[in-house]
Amino acid sequence: MSRAGPNASAVGDVIDDLRESTPSFPLDGSDVTILHSPSDFYNQLLHNIRHATTRISISSLYIGNDALSRELVQALHDACKATPSLEVSIVLDYSRGQRGGPTSSVAVLTPLLDAFPSNVSLHLYRVPQLDRWGFLPPPFDETIGVSHTKVYLCDDTLIMSGANLSGDYFTQRQDRYIQMHNADLAGFYHTFVKIVTDHAHHVQLVPSATASVSSNHTTPSEDRSPLTTSVVPPATSHVDFASALLSLQDYQPTTPRWTTTTMAIPTIQFSPLDILHDEDTLSHVLHRLPASSRIDIASGYLNFPPFLIRLLADRAFHLDVVTAAPSANGFFNGNGIKGALPMAYSLIEAEFYDRFATSQLTLREFNRDGWTFHAKGMWIQHQDEALTVVGSSNFGQRSYGRDLESQVRRHALDDKYADHN
């Protein structure tokens, strides 16, 4: 028998509770666009970059070195050339962003730094766990924790996604991508990216007698001497970073919180610094929802933390969960220990399935020939109201225990603006 949560209430009432204690942003439903495919995501990114006039803020795990990724970097180059006052701020993960040396994200972006040193800044956020575990070689250092957020901002237009910036994510790796056009919400995430960059390592060009900045901002030619960079640690502490992240909870929209068809609530999670906003918000929502609510969850890596499994099981919601089949797991046919991960996730999946009554849980696997599944999200439906979650979190144990994550909860009063993808 399902147990009603304390003071169980409709979705709208739960959102009203959250709005009292966390930043929330009213949106017009028409300002929200669902992007359905990797190519939609890529083409929209290029469009937004090419039409940016003021500032671009990007937070991602890494940027690839394939042709499509380099075309995206070229779009940034062209945008800076077209708009000399454009500000571009990029923050990647410290470990993943440097992995590969001459083929790393830093190497791919170095010519952009060289061409537009006054416009472009590149930072690498180093998780505090590496203070103790920094001796681990790549890629094992990434298992300790990474900067995992995926925030793609051009002026007042935000694409919130779980996708990184590389060829797989632009072609045959299915993820989710929601575009929201709103000055206040964009301002929140521009501020978030600035906070991360202010507390991240700064990638700087090393002056060279043979590597000069081109006067007309053309792409550096192949016959020039290789550019070199240095990575400068921040002057701030982990405590400073935690304090700055917490300050986002006081962020105030410049427009009144009037009733609209859609409301967006951003959350941050970084448990190594005791930032538990996303976890606390999710727990509050699941505690308060009526047990008759339907909850759909997508995660490419099904490994929910104990608190989430307990909440889902104890409340006895009807659940529909989709994850990657072993062949659609991003580590399928990987080298070494990575190749064993799809089977490990299958075992975790079986344990999860056994935890629930078959009448309560529907468990599905994504399996499309030649594709991998990286989508993550949550959809909550109760009567005519919908609450959806989009962002970087896989809802897994490392999402809530190791990595820097951010998500947006979007509440739609009108079903036509609900995200069913």
Image (cartoon, rainbow, N blue to C red):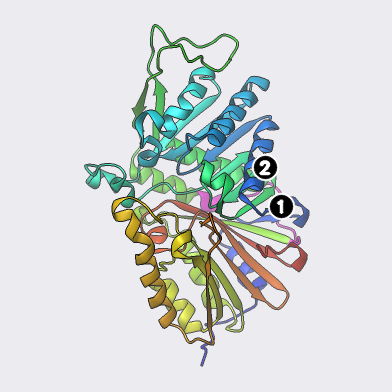
Give the percent coordinates (x, y) of residue 389.
58, 62
Q: Few, some or many C-alpha atoms within 10 Å of disc 2 (few <14, some 14-19, many ≥20)?
A: some
Location of residue 43 with respect to 297 vertically, above or below: above
Q: Amino acid at mark 2?
A: Gln
Q: Which residue ends up furthest to the bottom in the rendered image?
A: 1
Looking at the picture, tell me which residue is in the foreground, 392 or 140: 140
Mark number, residue 1: none
Give the percent coordinates (x, y) of residue 418.
71, 64
Q: Is residue 50 left or right of residue 118?
A: right
Looking at the picture, tell me which residue is in the foreground, 325 or 304: 325
Give the percent coordinates (x, y) of residue 72.
58, 33
Magenta-highlighted residues: 248-261
Is residue 171 rendered magenta in the image? no
Residue under numbered circle 1: 33
Separation of marks 1 and 2 at Cα, in angstroms? 10 Å
Describe the element under mark 2 as helix, strand or loop. helix
Q: Are marks 1 and 2 in contact (CB under 8 Å)?
A: yes
Report the residue at 48% width, 87% height from top: 357
Residue under numbered circle 2: 44
Location of residue 401 with respect to 153 vertically, above or below: below
Would you say residue 414 is visible in this rendering?
no
Location of residue 105 with respect to 145 vertically, above or below: above
Mark closer to the observer (1, 2): 2
Q: Is residue 45 left or right of residue 150?
A: right
Q: Amino acid at mark 1?
A: Thr
Report the residue at 46% width, 63% height from top: 395
Quarter of the image for the C terminus: give it: bottom right
